[in-house]
Image: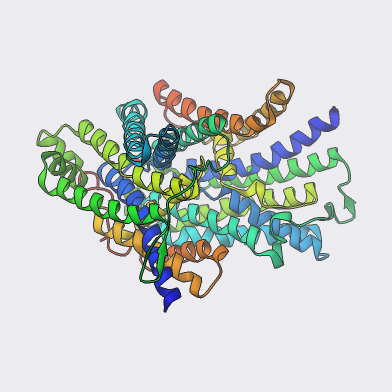
Amino acid sequence: VQLFLQLLANGVANGAAYVLIALGFALIYNATREFHIAHAGSFTAAGYAGHVLHGRGLGLAGALAAALLAAGAYGWLVDRLVYAPLRRLRATPLQIFVVSLGVLTVFSALVEIAFGPDDRSWGAGAAPVSLGGVVLPAPFAILIVLTALIVAGVHVLMARSVRGYELRAVSANTELARGTGIRVPAVFGFAYLVGSATVAPAAVMIGLDAGTNPYRGLHLTLLGIVATLIGGTGSYAGAILTALAMALVESLGLLVSSSEWTRVMLYALFLGILMVRPHGLLGAAVRGKGGRA
Amino acid sequence: MMDGVVQLLVIAAIYAILGVSMNVLLSQVGIFSMAYGGMFGVGAYAAGLVLLHGGSFPLAVLTAVVACAVAGAIVSIPTLRTSGDYFIAATFALQIIAYDLFVNLVGVTNGPAGLYGVPPPSILGWAVDSGWKALALAAAFGAVALYVSYRIRSSNFGLVLRAISEDEVAPAALGRNVYGFKVATAVTASAIIGLAGAAYAAHLGYVNPSPFALDATVLVATIVILGGTGNFAGTFVASVVLWAFPEALRYLDVPTSVQGPLHQLLYGLLLLVIVVGRLLAGRRGGTVARRA
């Protein structure tokens, strides 16, 4: 039972990171339907920004602030400088994806040239947090709290603010939203800004715990993409719950198998689910957005 | 010197075969696969294992082709009914599964060390024992891949596929099985990867996991975009150009630790610049299939 509880806690801790990345990807994807694989770069940008400022003795709060700024700026700039011109040129989704892959490749290579390929440690960590015999690294304990706050914050943003309403309108039907006078490019920019910044706490806490390298973000982003698609396009709750479930499958999978097989199990499960439910678990048969279908 | 050039051309030809396969997917079906590294590895390991256990080279090629076709079917059948985004995610998952299997399935793949002592190919007594013969073999495989690709494009089948890339509803209304065509083409494109995998395993004599990581997908994509989507022959030219670049870099004084990321930087920039450039030039037709 003790082992089970510990694995459960590890699952929730990793799940908090997966939830943030999935939520960030879902915010962008639901609004724009663009396969923003360069989302991984916002995790990387946040990680190195936090790492550099943390190293300057600015503490955890400074590192978090820097990471939020870096991730948000990265996402917003990629949207303004790359995707927005492509949309004006009427690029196809496939072309936007290939360009996104190009952006990610260039960004990761530049980071690797600047910082090297290996994990950069953030220095000695704080003492682990222990509760009823279950032990978690301090950064992950903080991350669980931060994730809960961010999920609640995004919910309030979507439910109460004007920008939130506009974002939901654009996600539901871009053309109709445009017709009612919503400035769609500004909403897209907002989605990229918020969706990218959302990732930052995960990058900081994982960096504190395990270090920062140029490539960890891509694997986490794949988890976020899978959660968004399996959770059902357009459903934030679906993406969040799926991300959490994926982390639990990974961590509780250790009860039946060893650690090198958990990724294989997780993705085999994903392919299996696609065979049974091609549109994801919670999604209806979504064929593009209303305006296009 | 000459030997080095021949070696480079063999490797370039093998990657061009991968490029032709991806080119078929991009230009005929309008989808992108993230699993080029993993599928290439499936072919290479399948062929390497058959050869190590005393199987003949033709049997190894057949095994590699079938293994890749099966892997392609696993990701295509569930996803091609939905949007291309699900195909990207499924092939990304396949890439991770395949790579983890290469590294962790030690009993079969020998883990990170890989398979050693794969015998050189020999076809009905004709032993491929020199660089030139290896080049001839790779070129022959390339010709097969090109032939299959042009057949796909110019057949009735291909005409329907091109209609699909313009508009899926029209061919469906005419009673064409759009989904069936897409799956058949995706499986054929996957089978072509098996050719490249078998040629690679037999040519190098060993198979280890490192060439089959995600980076390979970016390289193949760059080859295809540089050569021109829909232009299968151009893929070969682009592959030679991109494989010559690291060689050129070797003559400049670039520290080895930076060479890997520099290659990636070039590939990424090429992807960006060419796609944007084509859009600016406003060319249609042969470029990446236009789908709304």
Q: Is residue A114 above or below residue A226?
A: above
Res A65 → quadrant: top left
- Residue B136 pos. (x, y %): 80, 40
Left or right, residue B23 beside residue B129 = left
Residue A244 showing in the rendered view: yes
- Residue B248 pos. (x, y %): 71, 23
Nearer to the camera, A114 or B105: A114
- Residue B130 pos. (x, y %): 88, 41
Q: Quadrant of the N terminus of chain B?
A: top right
Res B289 → quadrant: top left
Q: Residue at x 72, y 27 (%)?
A: B247
Q: Is residue B172 above or below residue A189?
A: below
Q: Is residue B12 above or below residue B80?
A: above
Q: Quadrant of the C terminus of chain B?
A: top left
Q: How is the image coloured?
A: rainbow
Q: Residue at x 64, y 42 (%)?
A: B146
Residue A19 showing in the rendered view: no
Q: Residue at x 44, y 34 (%)?
A: A99
Left or right, residue B82 beside residue B245 = left
Left or right, residue A272 beside residue B137 = left
- Residue B168 pos. (x, y %): 35, 48
Res B139 → quadrant: top right
